Each structure stands twice: as C-alpha cells, then as structure tokens.
Amino acid sequence: MVRKAAIGSAVGTTIEAYDFQIYGVASALVFSSVFFSDVSSSLGVVFSFATLSVGFLARPFGAIIFGHFGDRVGRKALLVTALMGAGGCTTAMGFLPTTASVGVWAPILLVFLRLLQGIFHGGEQGGAVLMAVEHAPPDKRGWYGSWTFIGSPGGTILAAGVMSIVTATTGDNFLTWGWRIPFLLSFLLLGVGLVIRFTVTESPKFAKVKSEQGKTKAPIIQVFQTSWRHVLISIGVNLGFNAFIWVLISYSLAYGTEYLSLSRELMLRATLIGSVVMIVSILVFARLSDRVGRPPVMFFGAAFLVIYPFPMFALLNTAEPIIVVLALAIGFCGASAVFGPLAAFLVELFPTKVAYSGVSVGYSLGAVLGGGLAPFIASLLMKVSGGQSWTVSLYLTFAGLISLISMVALRRIGTTVKP
C-alpha cells in the first residue's frame, strides 16, 4: 500500500499538473492570438499570463476549503473531488469560443474556468503529498514523498509533448482548432486517475489520529494559532522555487519565440528534456534528504535559485539550440534540490490532525506569490524594459533569496513534533 499510495499520488498529480501546465504552455503560444487578438502580440502575451495568474490566486481558497474537510473527513474523498473538478474545467476550456466569435465573453469564460481550476488544484497538492508521506516509513518519507512531485515534471512532459505533436500535425490549423486537442485529452486522463485513486486506502496515520483525538473543529484556525511560523516558512521556501520553475516551464517558451526568434518546436523540446532531467533529479535529491536531512539539501537548492538566473539568461541569449537546451536542463536539475525533499519537508512541519490545512495553505500561497505571478511579472518586465532580460534575472534572484532566508529561519525555530 505504501507504493500504491505513492504511485497514486504521482499519477494523480501528473494529471493535475498536465491540466494546469497545458494552460501555461497555451498562454505562451496560443491565447494571445485566440483570446487577445485585438492587441499587439507582446501585450497579448502579458494578458495571457495575467489569466494564468488567476488560477494561482484561486489556489489558497481551494487549499482552505479542501484542507478543512480533508482534516475533518479524510484525505481520499477530497483528492477524488479535486481531480474530477480540475479535469472537468480543463476539458471545458477545449470547447470555449474565441474572441472572433463572441467578443469579450471569450476571455471572461476563460478566466472563470481558470478560477475554478485553481480552486480544485489548491486542494490537490496538499492531499497528494499527505497520502504519499503518511503511508511511508519514517526513513523513506523523502523518497516516497518525492513520487508525488515527479508528477509536476511528468505533467510538463505530457503538456509539452502533446502540444509538440499537435503543433506538428495540425500545422496552419493549430491556431484555429488544433490547440483545443490537448485540453480535450484531459477527459481521458481523468478516467485513468480516478481508477487509480479509488484503489488507495485512507491515510493510516490520519485514521489513527482521528480515532484517538476525534475531528478537529477548525483546522485552519488551529494551524495559524500553533504553527504560523511554519506556515510562513513553507510559503517562503515554495515562493522562490515556484517563481523560478514557472519561468522555466512557461515564460521561457514565450521568451524564446518572441525575443530570440526560436521555433516553438525547439522550446517545447527543451522543456521536455529539462522535465526528464528534473524527474531523475527529484528522486536523487529526495533520497539524499533521507540520508543527510532535508535542510542541507534544500539549502543548496535555495542557493542555486539565487545564483543561477543570470547565467541561465546569458546562456539562453546565445540563441544556440544546444546551449538553450542545456540552460533549461541545468535549471530544472538545480531547482530539484528544493523540490525533491519538499513533500516530506512540508508534512514534517505540521501535526497530522491539521496537516492537510497547513501543507495546502503553505504550499498554495507560496505558489501564488511565486509561480502564479512569475510569468506575468517576467513578461511585464520585458515589456517595460524594452527586452532587457537582466530584469527577469534580478527578479528571480530576489525570489530565490526569500527561499534561502526561509531555510535559514527554519534552523532558528526548528520543527514541530508530530503526534
């Protein structure tokens, strides 16, 4: 059951990540032409990434809702609900009319569905992390917890891979109807995820705590009363990582095609290769964290987030295909030092009876302030600076400093003792 729980979390998170990241890829390559065709291409990209941010802004609300019931009712039922909701929203996006057909209603409907998708996704990540880590033995929490997060690059591989195939096969029809195919495929992935999730039992650790201590009346209030420092730590650590990784996943596509005149196919291929590198790196760093501890590994990762943005954009600006791929691959690898141990790290910060709320709120707020705003801020900085990439590098360095400072602060306050 330990492996089944980890696999179930990985597959479910892969599908959820696909839903979320196919939107990010489409924001970079499609939506400026389909939903914001009345403005310039560069401004259309800014607007597209603004709608991407809406999904992140909704995630804390989903984290609060799902965290509350997840700590009172159980992890499994809420995870099934989150998967169905997010998949349904993604499928519906594939049927949306364009601005050319219905005018301003097209982007309004897009934002509405993105908002709902963000709410459901906000309840997914914390629950999936808990199911994997709470089933795992203490000395392998990092290893099995990381299986949840390999779903993130797994979703990126699916999203970039499907989009690559669709762009190659639909050709000139890509912007008319081809872009819809990746969104409609979510319905098939949803069925696979539900079958797997229904076979996993409830978290044994949660079931034990619930039987001994009963239901927690207001989990989110208790989290902030007893563990507010750890909530801030989890937000800070995740903020820098999310800002960096979403620039890699999403904004780099727009940057490569818009400013470096590189092909969509090359940038998607670079993202695919980087995501494969990230899967391997996540597992390596997670296993290392089981042996030497989470803080040393994650401190190294946070330092990487501070140092690498300037060299990364210097490599990208060569516009040489091999160097561009290498630049992204190094980024995906180094960031995994934070991401690999992150699942176990988050769960170990909070008592089991309120862990769904604590993990979900901390993770989702970090994702909002980091990943949710990163592509939008990056595109805006490039727009107002006249295409100066050092502005984006500086932004990512500051975000990385927040992660680094958060890891230093954790050493001062320590972690909670789980019941």
Image (cartoon, grey):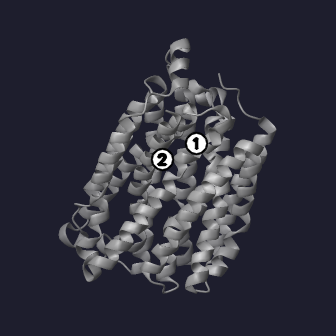
Q: In this view, does 359 lie to the left or right of 20?
A: right
Identify which residue is drawn at 57% across, 36% down. Answer: 133
**Classed neighbour count for the residue bearing mark 1: other residues with Cα under 10 Å, few (<14), some (14–19), many (≥20):** many
Identify residue for label 2. 10
Res 327 visible: yes
| Residue 325 to residue 223: above or below | below
Q: In this view, does 317 lie to the left or right of 176?
A: right
| Residue 277 to residue 192: above or below | below
Identify which residue is drawn at 61% across, 78% down. Answer: 389
Q: How far apart are marks 2 and 1 (CA)?
A: 9 Å
Assign a secondary structure to mark 1.
helix
Name the spot of residue 136 as percent of width and height, x first.
Answer: 58, 34
How many numbered marks have been drawn onto this rendered protein structure? 2
Res 236 visible: no
Nearer to the camera, 105 or 65: 65
Name the spot of residue 110 as percent of width and height, x first.
Answer: 31, 59
Quadrant of the drawing holding the C terminus? top right
Find residue 158 and report its image quarter: bottom left
**Classed neighbour count for the residue bearing mark 2: other residues with Cα under 10 Å, few (<14), some (14–19), many (≥20):** many
Q: Earlier in the sequence, mark 2 or mark 1?
A: 2
Name the spot of residue 84 as percent of width and height, x first.
Answer: 32, 43
Identify residue for label 1. 145
Q: Residue furthest left?
A: 101
| Residue 223 to residue 60: above or below | above
Find residue 353 and report its image quarter: top right
| Residue 93 to residue 72: above or below | below
Q: Which amino acid does label 1 sit on?
A: Gly
Nearer to the camera, 172 or 408: 172
Q: Which amino acid does label 2 sit on?
A: Ala
Identify which residue is drawn at 58% across, 47% down. Answer: 146
